Image (cartoon, coloured by chain):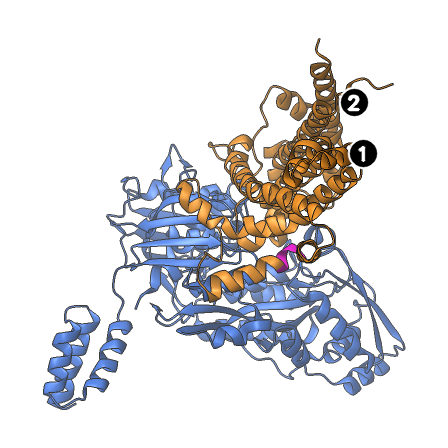
Chain colours: A orange, B blue
């Protein structure tokens, strides 16, 4: 078996174990939270009878272990169950059907932000390394550090105020529905995507810059310069190929953030993504939805990290033969 | 009225019904000597005053969650309560702005046997959105859905003592109760009780098919609802369509309003209300509600089992300060009577419980209590926004009366199930209820599950039951007056303040007199408002 393939399979196996552990942790921490689904939905108007009726309907009167194993058994077969909300009717709200449109929205936004942020930060990072300690370097550094240091909701409010309320170039809220056309979706998601770009760009840019600067001091770069290779070719052909590993790790980390860490941006822009769904589900203890969201988040992290590792290994074959 | 005025009134009316164009009106008005500017204003006012059909109404709501559903038994928030009031749903009865009950799906309610038996005649020719004609079996199934033994519906509290619901022919329903209830028609204004089509005695709510003013086009819980006017609606409604959008974040909601994305937002941010006030074409929606913020003390837990302690604390709270600082002035001080002054049978009990630390001290001294120390369990926001701030203000004001309040910060999560009704002194709020009877029955009757003060006054309970079946208005008013006085004097429920419903409305939308029993024109907003 090819060593890269073997590593990937090993990692995937470990990933599944991690997912199981995550599901246990999430399930037990939700069990420990005060109040249950029935109490939370009914709020102040809960009476012992209505709460009992809810629990009976949802099967919540059974022990937690039974419920966990039943759920995990179904999940392994690809059935994430039904959301607790609206369960009493004849039309069940499938968790997968609930999550799918939200997940699409989240991935849409994440992809949009990534498509802007990743090339931009690589370019800026490489240029900052090339012209390090120049005015360009300093300005890029201070601007990106400022945007990462500001809370994301603050950036969001500033963007809304300037571009939506004052200039009226964009929509102030990004409500999209299942039937929203692609172009309108793109337009509505523009401000949140820019916000997220501003938040993640500094990390990736500075990592690129540091990795390249580190390499620029190595003897083989000096050799390349001495034999007369142009500045841009030094970076592209000699420095970057060796800098991919750390950069890929940081990019993977930020992409994961784009999927799982954007609930604040979603709330400010009223964007129906999965973060908002999970927060609502946690606060009402809608266990099947929370579990499914948590698994998706964990899987996102695991897969992206795996991808980063594969990139590192492929660009640096030494890693395939650990001593 | 002169002939000239009569004529002018006639043409104004024609404008308001949309039968006369601006050009025709102007030429007429100017021909009788009215200046162009004045005529223009008159046209605009007249055109706005009478409802007319058309337009898409967009509403940015501070309520709604992804866990909401179309199941009427689960509706609890300010977004989905409107479903049953006037979106897809239509209940048997409605409330008018004066708080009186009016017939809606029902044509008449006839009591007999001292309110123990009611004969409900249904309006003929009502169809559901799927074309099915509404008949008595649908109504019976809808009511049973809420009051049945397996029901999870909070609507049970509005129909106390109902023992049987039967259809008598296609448009008559007979309801029997274990004890008389004169207020039954009021109970049916509740938003859970909107009518649904039934097959084999079971209602189908899953598709959102009702007989209300709007047909459900799409609904994503916690995101958006789109409705289209029901062309076969049996009453008047004006908008061609509605969009209800959940915008939980108050800054996002304000931005949506300011940029013209929505016509109306509820729960405006009181901290920045002046910005909304100065926005162009804006009317501040400000209705004083019958919705009290309370601080219930358990009357059977020490030290609140001593009436002197309860009375002293009532005098040790600076309620005006709470209204000014917690509600930014958008509210009214409470006087330990949970009945809002706009409700029928409401009284203002005397003496008014104002801030009087000296009096509080004197009451405690007389009862031989020194150094009163009490625990006060308070969530930051679960009972109402700013509950903890209110508690800290109360702590300060009570110091002057020699009462030491130990404010215990409780988590918002699980507050209603773990703290409220369990800790000796906590925070609470009550939504508006249509009648004095429901308001008192749910929160103060001895056997009520939500009697959050463990208030058990025999006289109060006796009056409450008697009044429910009393047909004589004067006697009934006297009974309710005594009830309210007892609660004010002796109860454990401190009514701190009544909050206002505050929102912002674009003047492109017009409305008549507003309901103040609940937010959004009592939930009738989408049915009763129109495009100016």
Tag on residue A219?
A: 1
Residues in magenta, as a range: A150-154
Q: What element carries label 1?
A: helix
Q: Is residue B343 left or right of residue B140?
A: right
Can residue B87 be found in the magenta stretch? no
The residue drawn where x is 58% and y is 74% is B482
Q: In this view, does A322 lie to the left or right of B96?
A: right
B523, A187: nearer the viewer: A187
Host chain of mark 1: A
A195, B68: nearer the viewer: A195
Q: Is mark 2 on a helix, strand or loop?
A: helix
Main SS category, magenta section: helix
Host chain of mark 2: A
Does residue B245 sit above or below A91 in this rendering?
A: below
Q: In this view, does B443 lie to the left or right of B147?
A: right
Label 1: how many Cα within 10 Å (few below 14, some 14–19, many 20+):
few
Tag on residue A319?
A: 2
Tell me which corner region of the image, top left, top right, bottom left or bottom right, holds residue B50: bottom left
Tag on residue B135?
A: none
């Amino acid at each position: 078996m090819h060593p890269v393939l073997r590593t990937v399979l090993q990692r995937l196996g470990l990933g599944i174990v991690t997912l199981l552990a995550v599901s246990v942790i999430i399930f037990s921490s939700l069990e420990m939270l005060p109040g249950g689904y029935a109490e939370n939905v009914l709020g102040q108007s809960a009476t012992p009878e209505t709460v009992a009726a809810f629990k009976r309907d949802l099967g919540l009167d059974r022990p937690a272990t039974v419920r966990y194993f039943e759920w995990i058994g179904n999940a392994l077969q690809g059935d994430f169950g039904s959301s607790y909300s609206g369960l009493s009717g004849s039309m069940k709200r499938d968790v997968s059907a609930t999550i799918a449109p939200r997940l699409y929205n989240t991935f849409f936004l994440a992809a949009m932000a990534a498509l802007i942020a990743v090339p931009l930060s690589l370019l800026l990072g490489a240029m900052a390394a090339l012209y390090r300690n120049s005015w360009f370097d300093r300005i890029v550094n201070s601007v990106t550090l400022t945007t990462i240091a500001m809370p994301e909701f603050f950036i969001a409010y500033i963007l809304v105020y300037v571009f939506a309320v004052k200039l009226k170039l964009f929509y102030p809220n990004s409500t999209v529905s299942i039937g929203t056309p692609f172009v309108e979706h793109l337009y509505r998601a523009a401000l949140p995507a820019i916000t997220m770009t501003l938040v993640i760009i500094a990390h990736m840019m500075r990592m690129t810059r540091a990795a390249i600067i580190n390499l620029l001091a190595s003897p083989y770069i000096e050799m390349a310069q001495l034999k007369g290779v142009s500045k841009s070719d030094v970076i592209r052909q000699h420095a970057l190929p060796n800098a991919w590993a750390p950069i890929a790790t940081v990019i993977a980390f930020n992409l994961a953030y784009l999927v799982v860490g954007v609930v604040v941006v979603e709330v400010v822009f009223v964007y129906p993504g999965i973060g908002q769904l999970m927060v609502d589900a946690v606060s009402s203890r809608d266990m099947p939805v929370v579990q499914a969201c948590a698994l998706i988040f964990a899987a996102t992290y695991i897969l992206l990290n795996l991808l980063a590792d594969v990139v590192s290994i492929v660009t640096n074959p030494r890693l395939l033969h650990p001593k | 009225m002169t002939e000239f005025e009569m004529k002018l009134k006639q043409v104004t009316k024609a404008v308001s019904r949309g039968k006369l164009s601006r050009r025709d009106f102007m030429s007429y008005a100017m021909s009788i000597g009215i200046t162009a500017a004045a005529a223009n204003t008159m046209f605009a006012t007249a055109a706005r005053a009478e409802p007319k059909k058309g337009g898409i109404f967009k509403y940015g709501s501070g309520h709604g969650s992804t866990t909401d559903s179309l199941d009427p038994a689960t509706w609890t928030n300010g977004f989905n309560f409107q479903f049953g009031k006037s979106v897809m749903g239509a209940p048997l009865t409605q409330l008018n702005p004066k708080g009186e009950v009016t017939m809606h799906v029902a044509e008449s309610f006839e009591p007999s046997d001292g309110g123990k038996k009611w004969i409900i005649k249904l309006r003929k020719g009502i169809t559901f959105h799927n074309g099915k004609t509404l008949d008595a079996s649908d109504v019976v199934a809808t009511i049973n859905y809420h009051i049945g033994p397996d029901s999870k519906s909070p609507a049970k509290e509005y129909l106390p003592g109902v023992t049987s619901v039967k259809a008598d022919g296609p448009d008559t329903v007979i309801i029997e109760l274990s004890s008389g209830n004169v207020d039954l028609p009021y109970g049916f204004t509740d938003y859970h009780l909107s009518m649904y089509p039934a097959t084999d005695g079971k209602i189908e709510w899953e598709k959102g098919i009702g007989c209300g003013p709007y047909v459900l086009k799409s609904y994503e819980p916690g995101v958006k609802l789109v409705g289209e006017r029901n062309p076969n609606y049996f009453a008047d409604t004006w908008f061609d369509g509605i969009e209800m959008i959940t915008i939980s974040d108050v800054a996002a909601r304000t931005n949506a309003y300011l940029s013209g994305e929505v016509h109306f937002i509820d729960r405006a941010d009181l901290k920045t209300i002046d910005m909304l006030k100065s926005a162009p074409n804006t009317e501040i929606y400000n209705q004083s509600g019958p919705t009290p913020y309370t601080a219930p003390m358990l009357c059977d837990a020490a030290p609140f089992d001593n009436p002197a302690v309860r009375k002293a604390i009532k005098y040790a709270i600076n309620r005006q300060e709470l209204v000014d600082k917690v509600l930014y002035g958008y509210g009214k001080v409470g006087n330990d009577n949970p009945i809002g002054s706009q409700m029928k049978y409401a009284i203002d009990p005397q003496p008014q419980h104002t801030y009087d630390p000296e009096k509080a001290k004197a009451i405690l001294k007389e009862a031989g209590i020194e150094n009163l120390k009490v625990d006060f369990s308070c969530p930051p926001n679960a009972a109402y926004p700013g509950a903890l701030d209110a508690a800290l203000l109360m702590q300060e004001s009570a110091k002057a009366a020699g009462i030491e309040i130990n404010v215990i910060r409780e988590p918002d999560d699980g507050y209603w199930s773990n703290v409220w009704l369990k800790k000796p002194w906590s925070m609470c709020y009550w939504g508006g209820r249509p009648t004095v009877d429901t308001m008192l029955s749910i929160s103060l009757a001895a056997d009520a599950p939500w009697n959050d003060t463990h208030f058990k006054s025999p006289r109060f309970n006796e009056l409450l039951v008697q009044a429910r079946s009393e047909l004589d208005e004067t006697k009934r008013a006297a009974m309710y007056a005594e009830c309210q006085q007892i609660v004010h004097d002796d109860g454990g429920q401190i009514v701190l303040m009544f909050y206002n419903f505050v929102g912002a409305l674009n003047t492109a939308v017009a409305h008549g007199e507003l309901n103040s029993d609940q937010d959004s024109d009592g939930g009738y907003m989408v049915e009763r408002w129109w495009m100016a």
